[in-house]
Image (cartoon, rainbow, N blue to C red):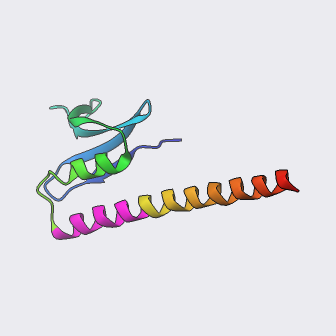
Amino acid sequence: MSTDIYINLDCGAELQITKIGDRFQVLEIVADSDGWRKQKARVIGRLHNTIIGAVNEVRNFALAQYEVLSLTEMESAINSTNQAIKDYFDQHNEYLANLQRA
């Protein structure tokens, strides 16, 4: 299962956010001069500790308004998912603590 995020921009750039170990890297996918060969990836920016950092790295490109809105929506979805996971574990820990007291 691929965990990479692919983003095609209006300017023609194709970006990929990929996980390297426990960090995230933005790559630009560059086509070979011969379109039949395997594409190459060029590192953009630095390694990020969070996926939000990598999404914010994409904001450095000249983006159309809808692309900015899409990134904002993606960031919001990531944050709400992270919060839902955190809430789940908080509730689960509370449940386990109550079981131990009983």
Q: How many marks?
A: 0
Decide if residue 43 is in sight here: yes
Name above or below for residue 92 compared with residue 76.
above
Q: Which residues are magenta?
A: 65-77
Q: Nearer the viewer, residue 99 or 3?
A: 99
Q: Quadrant of residue 65?
A: bottom left
Residue under the point 29% across and 30% down: 38
* Quadrant (top left, top right, bottom left, bottom right) of the N terminus: top right
Residue 39 position, x and y percent, is 27, 33
* Most common SS among magenta residues: helix
95 left or right, relative to 20:
right
Q: Quadrant of residue 101?
A: bottom right
* Outermost residue to the front: 101
Q: Is residue 70 magenta?
A: yes
Residue 84 position, x and y percent, is 55, 62
Q: Nearer the viewer, residue 59 or 12?
A: 59
Q: Is residue 4 magenta?
A: no
Name above or below for residue 71 compared with residue 1.
below
Residue under the point 47% across and 64% down: 80
* Quadrant (top left, top right, bottom left, bottom right) of the C terminus: bottom right
Decide if residue 35 is in sight here: no
Residue under the point 38% across and 65% down: 76
Residue under the point 69% across and 53% down: 93
Residue 87 position, x and y percent, is 59, 61
